Amino acid sequence: MPRFKMPVFRKMSEKGVARLLFPGGRVDGILCDITGVLRESSTSGDGIPIQGSLEALELLSKSGIQIRFVTNESKGTVRNNYCRPFLLVHDNVLQDFEGLNSDDPTCVVIGDAVDKFSYENLNKAFRLLKEKECDLISLGKGKYYREDGELTLDVGPYTAALEFAADRDAIVCGKPDKTFFQAALNSLGLPAERVIMIGDDIVSDVGGAQKSGIRGVLVRSGKYTQKDENHPVVKPDLIVDNLKALVDLIVQQ
Ligand SMILES: [Mg+2]
């Protein structure tokens, strides 16, 4: 059950969808995580849509509330700023870096590389950081996610290992970095206090958003575990069963 009093009627939109007053004030924009909120992660394809998520998106589209999907699976920032990366990323995102020269690397780009996180590859990255003083760029810093029903290591633990060994901090391109959330707010054209972030990662999604002044909503889908409800550091503004449950609290047909 949600941890707050039921919202009150706010106004009827032009499209016939009632907007409700959400705890903490009006919501005009939603930042929405993808994996674990819209769909479950799977090694055998795009994953299964989470119950009610498609219906929720349809309802949102009628409500006039803006939505932006925020995922660490986008690599645009790296392309724009760095020229010669040593790529320690999954094969299925290599195309995002097509055309970049990787000779004599000036930076190490680390993403969720799964089986490519071998000792050999991590050691090569470490040597570039330590001996060539390359920058360390991490595509997000999530600790883990849920795939095929099992908790699975994300990029964050490997980034932390390289940071530890090379005595430096990574430049994080993605959640929970503040610049990432600020870019999302800029895209919406809304102030932080009129936006909420919904995600299944208590630290990167909820905690990261809150550090940028955005209300953070945790879903009980994806990588969520019961322990997240009593996290020692991050206290979500709201916990809901899924995206549909959240949308039902914000809009009403
Ligand atoms: Mg997620």
Image (cartoon, rainbow, N blue to C red):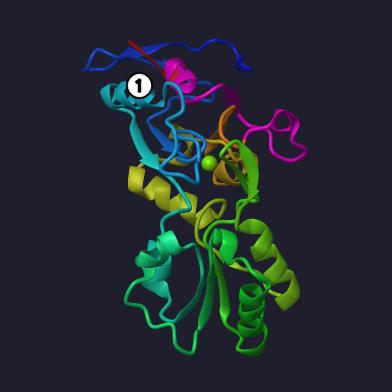
- Residue farthest along the right direction in this orientation: 232
For residue 33, side relative to residue 170 (left or right): left
Instruction: Where is residue 232? Give x, y as percent.
Output: 78, 38
- The residue drawn where x is 60% and y is 58% is 155
Q: Which residue is mark 1?
A: 55
Horizontal and vertical percent for residue 173?
A: 50, 61
Q: Is residue 253 left or right of residue 72?
A: left
Question: Would you identify the image quadrant in which residue 251 lies?
Answer: top left
Residue 111, position as x, y percentages in the image = 53, 62
Q: Residue at x 41, y 56 (%)?
A: 74
User: Residue most toward the left?
Assistant: 14
Residue most toward the front?
Answer: 44
Q: Is residue 235 above or below residue 102?
A: above
Please tell me whether residue 2 belongs to the stretch shown in magenta.
Answer: no
Residue 156's spot in the image, x, y percent? 64, 57
Label 1: element kind? helix
Residue in the picture at 36% in, 26% down: 54
Query: Is 246 within the magenta?
Result: yes
Q: Is residue 21 visible?
A: no
Range covered by the magenta-colored residues: 224-249
Q: Amino acid at mark 1?
A: Glu
- Local packing at callout 1 (Cα closer than 10 Å; few below 14, some 14-19, many 20+) is few
Looking at the image, which is closer to me, 153 or 176?
A: 153
Q: Is residue 112 visible?
A: yes
State yes or no: Cβ of the residue under disc 1 lies below 8 Å from any atom of ligand 1. no
Image quadrant in which the N terminus is located: top right
Residue located at (38% from left, 70% from top): 97
Q: Quadrant of the C terminus?
A: top left
